[in-house]
Amino acid sequence: MQRFDVVVIGTGSAGKSTADQLKKAGKKVAIIDKLPFGGTCSQRGCDPKKILVGAAEIVARSAQMSGKGIADVPKIDWAALMRFKKTFTDPIPERTEKSFAEAGIAAFHGVASFVSPTIVEVAGQQLEADYFVIATGAHPAHLGIPGEELLTDSTGFLDLQQLPEQIVMVGGGYIAFEFGHIAARAGSEVTIVHQGKLPLEGFDPDLVKLLLKATEALGIRVLLEAKVEGVEGAPGSLTVNVAQAGKQESIRTGLVVHAAGRPADLGDLNLDKIGVPFSKKGVVVNEYLQSVAHPTLYACGDAAEKGLPLTPLASWEADIVVANILNGNQQTYVDTAVPSTVFTLPPLAAVGLSEEAAREKVKDLKVNFSETRDWYSSKRINEPVSGYKILIDPATDRIVGAHLLGAESDEVINILTLAINQRIPVKVLTNTLFAYPTRASDLSSMLQ
């Protein structure tokens, strides 16, 4: 048996940051991962996805300006785009493992499983530690439908060497819409099947409806209040059986992508055996990100029940865990406004409260909502849909929620995040001179 001060399980943003900081503080640290070292975001998630979005953005912008100065709309060379993506992702596992070795962090490949609250087993070895940090991330949800094994997950999509002519996305969240917009602009016929009344739950319904217009105008078929009852066939030649409004439909496709949610990846850890409570959202933790059952166990990132499954938040939570292991429980998790973006074209971004939540908390809430496709910032690029919704507390003159749709929304939302978290009055923002003409310079009009 090997003995450590801290064992970290997971090598993504939260796990790697935790291990690095604890080692620098003088702790004897081990880290474990059953997947290639480096985590989801850098290899199988946000980073490679954004590379594909970049190519799709060029096609989208060119198509919008076709006949308005752009003569030829470019096409995506999928194989070449994948080769370019791999220049970013392929070096990560080796580079990550090398960084652990250079830092003196003991790295273990394999599935981690708790034997007791103080011992974890991996690849036939037992590691004992004073503290454990669970940062195992998330994985595709179990759907419980016939033929589920025929679905491809987001990892598989981001590693496709050829893009099928037809693709069905099961689910209506980030993955479905981001991958759908990419695939459609690369020439695929895309269908999104979602059980709810509106997709992208958690984002502003009025802006989601506008995005739906742009999505359907792109040629993507969106089936709402529809349920996938099963998938049949063989890879490359599949049939998706869908029920909608009492009717049955069979959709022929070359690929079916799992886009129906990602719960915390905790199934292998044997947490039940050591009495650690957890949910689909993650390990149940207190304000110190410490297990409510075992004081020697912490969780952060997508594996913790608190917070949103976002990379910047994972790194921020890692800082809290490190501080509490080193200094005792002094630093608490405090809800903060964290921006999130759906990287469709145009992108949809949000921070702070939804309109529904804001109406419950704020008396005489001021709601500024408008479509903006006739504004100069949208007209100059012939953008088909854009809009905003800003939620203001008139008593404090502060923004409590912000929702944007349109080009560069993923950047402008950061200004609004700063305004919410630093409690900057609306009057200060409206009197601030932003570079013109930019999307940020539209803020004064949004806030009136």
Image (cartoon, rainbow, N blue to C red):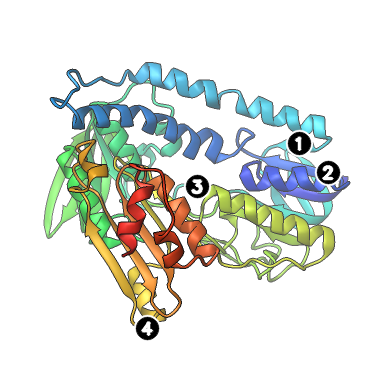
Label 3: how many residues lie within 10 Å, few (<14), some (14-19) or many (20+)?
A: some
Rendered image quadrant of residue 37:
top right
Secondary structure of the residue carrying tag 2 is helix
Amino acid type shown at disc 4 = Lys
Secondary structure of the residue carrying tag 1 is strand
Dot in front, 2 or 1: 2
Amino acid type shown at disc 3 = His
Question: Mark 1 sits on what residue?
Answer: 107
Question: Mark 2 sits on what residue?
Answer: 24
Of the image marks 4 and 3, the number of the one nearer the N terminus: 3
Measured Cα–Cα span from mark 1 to mark 3: 22 Å
For this orientation, the residue located farthest to the bottom is: 363
For the point 17% across and 18% down, the residue is 71
Question: Mark 3 sits on what residue?
Answer: 139
Of the image marks 2 and 4, the number of the one nearer the N terminus: 2
Dot in front, 2 or 3: 2
